[in-house]
Image (spheres, grey):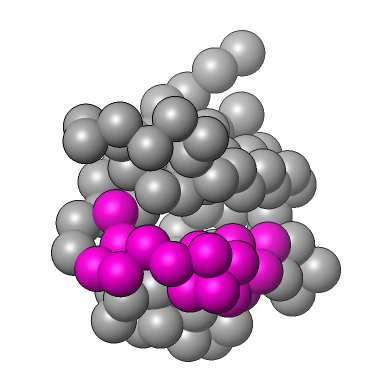
Amino acid sequence: MITHIVFFKLNDPTPVIIEKARQALQSLYNKVPSLKHIEVGVDVLKNPRSYDIALIAKFDSLTGLSEYEHHPDHVKVGEYIRSVSKSVVSVDYESK
């Protein structure tokens, strides 16, 4: 199992923009066949070091993660998310 975690710090983290970004990310679940699980959370502490949105996605393999990364719906959502973000960081790891 591959776990893909991404944090997004938005340029203008208003409730409307946060919700639109959260919905865009969540919408990938039914569109990308290799995506086995997705969780999208919004930061509740609002600390200066906090990111605004976290995404946790799971795939059966690195091939599944690659299929997700290149899927047209993910590419489209990624373009939108990058346009409203000032920082995006991620980590991918294998779990048993």
Taking the spot 58% from the left edge, 82% from the top edge, the residue there is 73
Q: Nearer the viewer, residue 95 or 40?
A: 40
Q: Quadrant of residue 79?
A: bottom left
Q: Is residue 42 above or below residue 50?
A: below
Residue depicted at x 59% and y 43%:
41
The spot of residue 21 in percent (x, y) is 52, 69
Q: Is residue 96 left or right of residue 27?
A: left
Please state the horizontal and vertical placement of residue 23, each as a whole percent of the image. Answer: 66, 69
Give percent across and percent down for residue 42: 55, 45
Where does the C terminus fall, quadrant-wise?
top right
Q: Is residue 75 visible?
A: no
Name the foreground residue: 3 vs 48: 48
Task: Provide the residue span drawn in magenta.
Answer: 9-26
Is 80 drawn above or below residue 93 in the view shown?
below
Pinpoint residue 86: horizontal percent, then vertical percent.
18, 64
Left of 48 or right of it: where is 3?
right
User: For this rendering, which residue is in front, 91 or 45?
Assistant: 45
Q: Residue at x 73, y 44 (%)?
A: 37
**Magenta stretch holds residue 2:** no
- Which residue occupies the extreme top position in the image? 96
**Residue 52 visible in the current orientation:** yes
Q: How many marks?
A: 0
Quadrant position of residue 26: bottom right
Query: Looking at the magenta stretch, what is its main secondary structure?
Result: helix
Determine whether, in the image, residue 24 is placed left or right of residue 77.
Answer: right
Is 90 left or right of 73, judged from the image as shown? left
Q: Quadrant of the N terminus?
A: top right
